[in-house]
Image: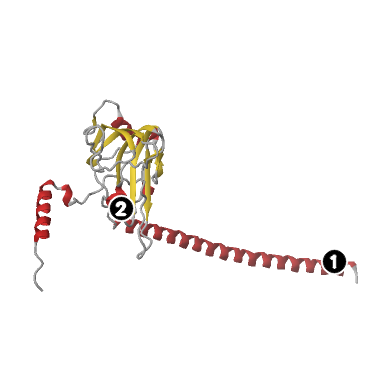
Amino acid sequence: MSTDNTTELLTQVAVRANALCQSVQDHAGNINATVNAKKAEMDAAKQQAHQDIQNYIAGARAEQSHILLSRNQQMEPLGSNAIKGFTTIGLESFEVVKEATIYGEVGKHDEDHTGGGVATSFRDNVYRGYVNKKFHILRIKWKTSPGKTVRLDNTYYQGYDQGALTKGCYIKVIEGQLAGDLQPVTEFNDGWKLHAYRQKANSSTGGFYAPHTALSFSSETGEALICLYGSVSGYVNLEDNAWGCYPEFARPSDIESLTGNIATLNSRVNELETPPA
């Protein structure tokens, strides 16, 4: 075989090899394009499914109301040593001062009762929106009783903390340490924090559990600013810092005009004779 023939054959082989390589590359390109297109479709479907789930959760939460289970979330003090409606236990001493009242628009309706700037601190760092129902910010000082269980409000004892519920408050610890099931959810500036606890009603047959000690004090003495402490029904959307002042159903015992009537009716019922068979 001559050199020219060999060269021609090698040239033909090279051309065919190049054509084969190009064909393989073309097929690989088509495969990659198909895979990328399917991947894009799957990513879009995944994103849409995620959005659908978020929309469903938001819609379900929007249909769920939250009713106050505890008392006096506005935190009206009772004298200088108690909070109205709260069952505080385990304290040797407890001081309460109404520092501020938050209401309406910023700078128009808020009240600073002591001149300590507490209302301004709360508005500047926690919430500047309109407040439809006024609430108070209290300064509390405590000294615990040695060996005693300490609870700011013994709500579980009252029997209303059942099922799916959320407990929470805004608090700024000045001195001392907190304890209990409420944990920091959001930290704001100037020491303010949102503390909260949530539980679901996971069983339709078993008993419900709610923490006995929602908010306690682990230090012997301490001082803090606190507002909007309470328990509400349902699973509150804490992810968006959605904690505020919740509606409360009046209990008959809370309505002074009904108290006497209820006692009279109970007495009359007890005095009724059992009718003959």
Seen from the viewer's position, the closer of residues 125 and 98 is 98
Sequence-earlier tag: 1 or 2: 1
Secondary-structure class at tag 1: helix
Q: Residue tagged by mark 1?
A: 7
Tell me where residue 116 appears, x and y as whole percent.
Answer: 29, 26
Secondary-structure class at tag 2: loop
Q: Is residue 222 above or below residue 186?
A: above
Question: How many residues crowd mark 2 within 10 Å: few (<14), some (14–19), many (20+)?
Answer: many
Tell me the quadrant of the picture where the N terminus can be found: bottom right
Tell me where residue 54 appears, x and y as whole percent.
Answer: 39, 57
Is residue 231 something that shows in the picture?
Answer: no
Question: How many residues crowd mark 1 within 10 Å: few (<14), some (14–19), many (20+)?
Answer: few
Seen from the viewer's position, the closer of residues 237 and 201 is 201
| Residue kind at label 1, given as amino acid type | Thr
Seen from the viewer's position, the closer of residues 149 and 109 is 149
Q: Which mark is residue 124?
A: none
Q: Nearer the viewer, mark 1 or mark 2?
A: 2
Q: Residue tagged by mark 2?
A: 161
**Which residue is at the far top?**
115
Is residue 211 something that shows in the picture?
Answer: yes
Using the numbered discs, state the Cα–Cα distance from disc 1 to disc 2 in whole angstroms. 94 Å
Q: Is residue 8 left or right of residue 135?
A: right
